[in-house]
Image: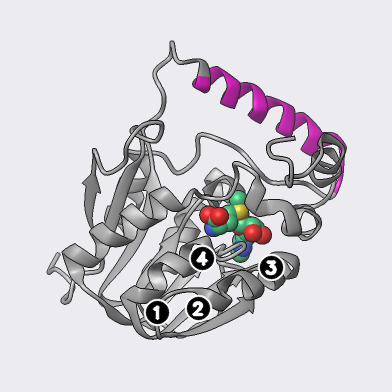
């Protein structure tokens, strides 16, 4: 157990043996008491920097919004609407409750759907955020994900996320992550439906390269976060107002 109100080991095991979506439906009421929820201290800081650098926008979307962590902090950066999209209805139900007192004026729309194919029109959003969810996107799906983000961005719009560089070879966290990934690969080979969650995905410099390959201008901000998150890098990938001539 991570926290007295968090899930028990048995509940976590039940989640891990379910599909990704069913797993999140099960854990939703206790999700905010797990380390998988992006900490407010990171989101508050990220939102502050993003606002300082580029102000507000009419419409934003938080991809894989979960219980609404990103929506809460980025709502004040949107003047008209902020959308939270997630595949798990259970997570969205919790988000609806938790966001009742979220600061800001923008309309909050929570919708069940796939971040890889949200169905929104091209250029719909001036701000797209995604936190704590890259582990659910298989590495071979990352190019498709970034293409979809780029399609959704309005010219001048920003894609904001937090990632890091790969931990050095001597770092225990690298080997814990690799061990976890190995167990998940075995689990997914023998148990269906799969639970897609892997560490060490969408890291720098690969994530930067993917954004740039889609024409986004990337700013990587180091030193944005304090210990124990000091390795985290805030990334702001902006869609240029005009497409550059090739
Ligand atoms: C670890 S939680 C992170 C939630 C929230 N963004 C946060 O930072 O606390 C990951 C969320 O991603 C959602 N998810 C995973 N794959 C998704 C996809 N392809 N489209 C939409 N949601 C997805 C899960 O249902 C879950 O709510």
Could you tell me which quadrant the C terminus lies in?
bottom left
Kindly report which numbered mark, 4 or 3, lies closer to the viewer in this rendering. Answer: 3
Q: Between disc 1 and disc 3, whose residue precedes? A: 3
**Helix, strand or loop at disc 3?**
helix
Q: How far apart are marks 4 and 3 (CA)?
A: 16 Å
Q: Distance between the residues labelled 1 and 2?
A: 13 Å
Left of 76 or right of it: where is 193?
Answer: right
Q: Residue 25's spot in the image, x, y percent?
A: 78, 60
Which range of residues does the magenta coloring cover? 173-192
Q: How far apart are marks 2 and 3 (CA)?
A: 15 Å
Rate crowding at label 2 as few (under 14), some (14 to 19) or many (20 or more) other CA atoms within 10 Å.
many
Q: Mark 1 points at which residue?
A: 104
Q: How far apart are marks 2 and 4 (CA)?
A: 8 Å
Q: Distance between the residues labelled 1 and 3?
A: 19 Å
As drawn, the label of residue 83 is 2
As drawn, the label of residue 94 is 3
In the picture as drawn, the residue positioned furthest to the top comes out as 170
Q: Residue 239's spot in the image, x, y percent?
A: 25, 68
Q: How far apart are marks 1 and 4 (CA)?
A: 19 Å
Q: In which quarter of the image is residue 231?
A: top left
């Amino acid at each position: 157990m991570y926290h007295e109100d968090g899930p028990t080991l048995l509940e976590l095991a039940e989640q891990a043996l379910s599909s990704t979506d069913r797993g999140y439906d099960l854990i939703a009421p206790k999700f905010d008491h797990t380390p998988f929820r992006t900490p407010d201290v990171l989101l508050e800081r990220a939102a502050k920097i993003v606002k300082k650098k580029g102000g507000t926008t009419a419409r934003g979307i938080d991809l894989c919004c979960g219980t609404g962590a990103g929506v809460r902090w980025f709502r004040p950066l949107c003047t008209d609407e902020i959308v939270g999209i997630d595949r798990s209805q259970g997570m969205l139900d919790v988000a609806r409750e938790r966001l009742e007192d979220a600061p800001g004026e923008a309309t909050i729309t929570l919708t069940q759907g796939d971040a890889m194919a949200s169905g929104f029109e091209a250029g719909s959003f001036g701000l797209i955020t995604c936190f704590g969810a890259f582990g659910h996107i298989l590495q071979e799906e990352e190019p498709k994900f970034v293409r979809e983000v780029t399609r959704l961005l309005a010219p001048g719009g920003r894609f904001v996320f937090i990632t890091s560089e790969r931990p050095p070879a001597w770092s225990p966290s690298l080997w814990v992550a690799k061990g976890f990934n190995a167990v998940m690969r075995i689990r997914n080979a023998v148990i269906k439906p799969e639970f897609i969650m892997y560490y060490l995905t969408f890291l720098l410099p690969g994530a930067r390269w993917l954004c740039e390959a889609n024409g986004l201008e990337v700013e990587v901000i180091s030193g944005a976060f304090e210990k124990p998150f000091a390795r985290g890098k805030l990334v702001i990938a902006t869609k240029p107002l005009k497409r550059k001539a090739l």
